[in-house]
Image: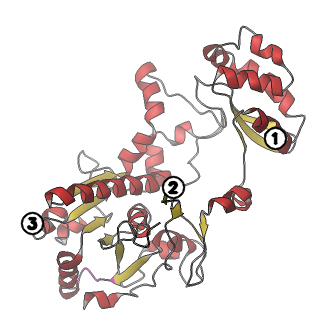
Amino acid sequence: MSTTLPLQGITVIELGSSLAAPYAALILAEMGAEVIKVEHPEGGDAARTWGPNGAYGFSLMFETFNRNKKSITVDFTDKTELARLRKLIVDRADVVLQNLRPGVVEDLKLDGPSLLPQKPALIYCNLGAFGGTGEMSRLPGYDPLMQAFTGMCDVTGPEGGEQCRVGVPVVDMGTGMWAAMGILTKLLTRKNSGAGGQVDVALYETAMTWMSMPMASVMATGKSPGRYGLRGPGGLAPNRGYQASDGVMIITAGTNYQFRKLCAALGHTEWAQDERFTTPRGRSKHETEMSGLIGDVIHTQTRAHWMAVLDGVGVPNAPVHTPVEAFNHPQTASSGLIQGSADGSSPQVALPLKFDLARLPYRHRAPKLGEHNDLLK
């Protein structure tokens, strides 16, 4: 990969806290943009205190989502400091992104309609909770609230069990991804037109998009699809978790060919001839009976045994790992996803993309609060 990073020369002002906007800005920072994070002088981003601390006195979570950035502090109640921030934006910024409480940037005249007339080439991105329209547009929001509100919790968890939150902040990080995609698109179109503009994304809308498959079921049947645990939704079978002698593994045979291979690998070629199981629709209709037969065989051996057998015949499968097992797996090491930093801060998980076969570099640790305040002088 060239030593020139894709977004080198682009300056981003992040008026962000918690996770959604910081993750969007992290994506841009990893690609080489100069990201200047604006924080309150008293404590800064609340995420600095979430969870155990790393080597530099702030939380590991903050380190994870704010590496490769700079930090300045601005007291929004101080007119002089606010004027310096506006000047920094007009003089240097290509992008501003924000996820402050609804109404804050408008009151401070740091919103898109206030800044774009001063700098038409600016790209301004709002990361809201419920979006800019509707009766809930002025409400704040967090990832778990959106999981609850959109029904995501209702389709997550064990079959017949309690509703659950997804174990990672998929709504926050997904919204950050959509924001980054919107900003990159605007940067591309600006090259031809010279004009910036506004990008709007919202936690609620991201969560609803992740719910596209359950919503399709609602639109078709008028009913909620329910919870499946480690079993996939109807239409594809076998596609669920099976208990081996030493733990759980997931087996997904998505085609007739794969199902025949699975049956042969388990020593039961007759299953592939059973009229109940010869077609995808039949296997889905009789999923309970079929998976009972498969499960009885899988239970007799270890996950490693069945992984070797099934990998050998091309049947997709995977063990249900703990995070520790996934971290320590040789595939994780060979992927290069875990990156160390030259300045000795905590290792981090890289972005899941490469340019010219090389990963984007982990250049420097997350900033101390106000570490780059000289940028405001």
Left or right: 198, with 146 as reference point: left
Residue position for label 2: 169
> Hey, which residue is sitting farthest right in the picture?
300
Q: Magenta residues?
A: 73-77
Q: Is residue 124 above or below residue 162?
A: below
Query: Closer to us: mark 3 or mark 2?
Result: 3
Q: Is residue 120 above or below residue 56?
A: above
Q: Nearer the viewer, residue 207 or 186?
A: 186
Q: Rate crowding at label 2 as few (under 14), some (14 to 19) or many (20 or more) other CA atoms within 10 Å.
A: some
Residue 329 in magenta stretch: no
Left or right: 290, with 371 as reference point: right
Which of the 4 quarters of the picture holds residue 82? bottom left
**Residue type at mark 2?**
Pro
Q: Which label was assigned to residue 117? A: 3
Q: Is residue 291 visible?
A: no
SS class, disc 3: loop
Q: Nearer the viewer, residue 120 or 310?
A: 310
Q: Nearer the viewer, residue 219 or 374?
A: 374
Q: Rate crowding at label 1 as few (under 14), some (14 to 19) or many (20 or more) other CA atoms within 10 Å.
A: few
The x, y position of residue 159, in whole percent, is 65, 33
**Residue type at mark 3?**
Pro
Residue name at image x 15 percent, y 61 percent: 194
Give the distance between the C-alpha atoms of the residues marked 1 and 2, in whole angstroms.
33 Å
Query: Closer to us: mark 1 or mark 2?
Result: 1
Q: Rate crowding at label 3 as few (under 14), some (14 to 19) or many (20 or more) other CA atoms within 10 Å.
A: few
Left or right: 175, with 324 as reference point: left
Q: Which label was assigned to residue 308? A: 1
Residue name at image x 41 percent, y 55 percent: 177
